[in-house]
Image (cartoon, helix red, strand yellow):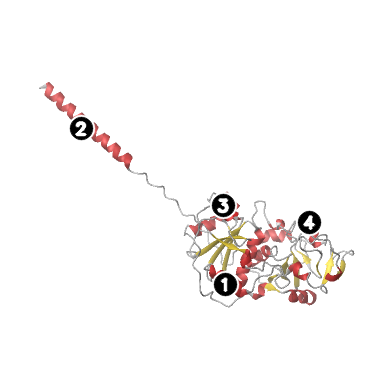
Amino acid sequence: MKKKLFALMMCLALALAFCVSCGSSSQEAEPEAEPETEATEAAPVEQRTVYVTPDWVKSVIDGSQEGYENYVLAEVAYPTDPSDGYNEGHLPGATYVSIQEVEDATGSEEGAYNLLAADAVRDYLLGHGITKDTKVILYGDDISGTARQAYGYIWCGVEDVKILNGGKEAWTAAGYELDKEEVAAPEAAADFGTDVPAHPEYWVSIEDAKDRVANDENFKLVSIRSEDEWLGKTSGYGYMDKAGEPEGAVWGKGAQSAADVADFTNPDGTVKDLEGLKEVWADCDFTLDNFLAFYCGTGWRACPPFLVLYENGYDNIAVFDGGWYEWLMHDDYPVQVGDPASDDCVHTTVGQLETGKAVTE
């Protein structure tokens, strides 16, 4: 009897062990569930806000920013084909746009690196699926170039244009990944939705600049150039052989050379806010109550200060697009060489300027 009971208990133990073993194998065969990634949340911003944080851009990509369900995200660079930087890594879903889609690239007397005709800019925008109502987010390695693109879009009529402040460096510093997957071109749009340019008041021609600086006391032609350019020691460019500034211009600082806007940036490479610009301009010969027309050599460096004031609600602002380059094309136009507050400042005309002021490598 004891033998039968022992045999029965052994059978039960073996059966239980077999069941446990099968259950364990079954559990191991099931794949582990992927942890859910929470969508990034960020506070909403006003439509005219231009410079935004990586968290805000990520919230748009994650679909958690109300009103930004449909958007175009684009990396800005100068070449007409995607740059090495874009191909090496771009924000998820980002396409590519060229600065040559907003400005003349020939540098000819007719173009002078000014903005393209508004209908040409509009057609490029439509090709990227952008209308006046499209939410556009831009970023790029060149602070001035990206600002130039945003300014051109706003001038043409896009109502909501953002820039990722700090570009890809800020994006990766915030812990976000870049993508190398090819992004399909957006579907082209047919109707921009408004006449272009929608904001001609943000653009000042050379004729208007010359007239207003001479006859309108409230109008300030603000040079966003390096000190050496401002004082006429160098043109700042290899293709400009004469140095100086338009007669009556005031200095708005901003740059250490023709290739940067160092005075307008923070140590981390982001563009300063309005309070930061006010500090830079504390001793300058203009106030924010003046009508301010920013310029530089060809228009790029003039755009960041324009955008900072624009996003803070200022409308008494514009860009003198032609800058020093277009001014040089008129021998009879008045020029100042040196600090206009100094007795040493020379007042002359373009045609009388000495040559040899181009930047040489």
Residue at image x 15%, y 24%? 6
Distance from Cα at disc 2 to Cα at disc 3: 59 Å
Which-is-in-front pick, marks 2 and 3? 3
Label 2: state its secondary structure: helix
Q: Disc 3 designates what residue?
A: 88
Asked whether residue 274 is in view, the answer is yes
Amino acid on which disc 1 is placed: Asp
Check if mark 2's residue and mark 3's residue have beta carbons within 8 Å. no
Q: Disc 2 designates what residue?
A: 15
| Pointer 1 local density, CA inside 10 Å: few below 14, some 14–19, many at least 20 | some
Which-is-in-front pick, marks 4 and 2? 4
Q: Disc 1 designates what residue?
A: 123
Check if mark 1's residue and mark 2's residue have beta carbons within 8 Å. no
Distance from Cα at disc 1 to Cα at disc 2: 76 Å
Q: Disc 4 designates what residue?
A: 360
On the image, which quarter does residue 254 sit in? bottom right
| Pointer 4 local density, CA inside 10 Å: few below 14, some 14–19, many at least 20 | few
